[in-house]
Structures are given as C-alpha cells and as structure tokens.
Image (spheres, rainbow, N blue to C red):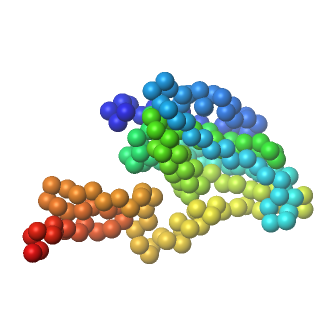
Amino acid sequence: MADEPEKNLLEILEENNPIDINKYTNYVHSPKCGAIATFYGNTRDTFDGKTVVELRYEAYVPMAIRCLKSICSQARSLWDVNTIAVAHRLGPVSVGETSVFVAVSSVHRVNALDACKFVIDEIKASVPIWKKEVYSNGEVWKENTEFLERRVDIGKARVCCKPKTKVEDDEGVKKGCCRPKVKVEDDESNA
C-alpha cells in the first residue's frame, strides 16, 4: 500500500453540522483491508463533579487541515495503512453527540489500531482546535492533557511523536527518531 497515493478524507465541520459516521467509515472501507479502527470523541454529561451542558469548539481551519494532513503522513510513515478519515465539529456539541471521529483502514488490525490511536493523540496534542466546556454553573476553556504534556517537554529534549524505532543504515549506524545517531559494532568486531 505504500506506493499508492495517500487516501485521506479530512474535514472540519461548521457549526450545527453533525458527523456522519457512516460517511467516514464507508470512505475507509476497502475489500483489501481486514481492519477498520475507529475513535469517537463524544460529549459526556459530567466533568470533575460538574454538570456539562455542551462543549464549544473553535479552530483556525486552514492550519488545522494542514496539521491533519501532516499527522496522516506521519501515521503512514509508521504504519502500513490504506485510508484515513478524520472529522471534527466546530461550534456547540451537546451531551451525547460526537465532536471528533477518526477511522483508519489497513490489511491487519494492529496497524489500524495503532495508527488510529496515534492520529487522535496527535490531534489532541497539536491541531489548533480549542474546546470550551459549558457547565450548568459556568464555563471554562480546556487544554487537552496531550497538549499540556507536549508543552512541558518543549525545550527539554527533542519532542517526538514517533515510536522509538531504530533503523540501521548501510554503515551500521542506528537512527532513532528521538535519539542521536549511534554507531553500533557487531560482536565479532569487538572480539
């Protein structure tokens, strides 16, 4: 699947436009794929003992779409996936409604599941979409845990969203995404 063009359906939906789960699931469906992994982010009715009335989302849409494209490209570089679909609502999202949906298809379930988790985690950490929780007795803008964790790491060490995989090049140098290049000698040369 790696030599095919990237197949993505990425949408930021305007206010009062619910997510059509079937549209995105059907988009990623393929006879060559044995797995479709999905994630639904729904508005729950309580948070920290407070009654939630709704969530309200705002976004910088052009940048959000660019970020989503980049996240999908990163997911494809890490896992063998066929198709990715992402939808995120803007405006008010009532309790029980879906605000974000991710669907990923692949030949095998491990790739679909891992890529789906990566995509939603990266959306929460880096896409310019802001959430306000509206309670029965007030409201507050919320920062996602993934964003806060990423922000704490800025400036300390190189922040990375890829698994710490190591690939050996032709010279025996192992490259890791967050680690410096290290020359690895095989055991026979050390003897």
Q: Is residue 27 left or right of residue 18?
A: left
Q: Is residue 169 above or below residue 27?
A: below
Q: Is residue 90 visible?
A: no
Q: Is residue 183 left or right of residue 121?
A: left
Q: Nearer the viewer, residue 30 or 62?
A: 30
Q: Position of residue 169 (x, y in %)?
A: 20, 56
Q: Position of residue 105 (x, y in %)?
A: 51, 35
Q: Position of residue 121 (x, y in %)?
A: 56, 54
Q: Is residue 77 left or right of residue 23?
A: left
Residue drawn at x 58%, y 62% as measured from the top left: 147
Q: Position of residue 189 (x, y in %)?
A: 9, 70
Q: Is residue 87 above or below residue 55?
A: above
Q: Nearer the viewer, residue 42 or 123?
A: 42
Residue drawn at x 46%, y 44% as measured from the top left: 111
Q: Quadrant of the N terminus?
A: top left
Residue drawn at x 73%, y 47% as measured from the top left: 42
- Count the marks: 0
Q: Which corner quadrant of the image does residue 158 belong to?
A: bottom left
Q: Quadrant of the C terminus?
A: bottom left
Q: Nearer the viewer, residue 60 or 157?
A: 157
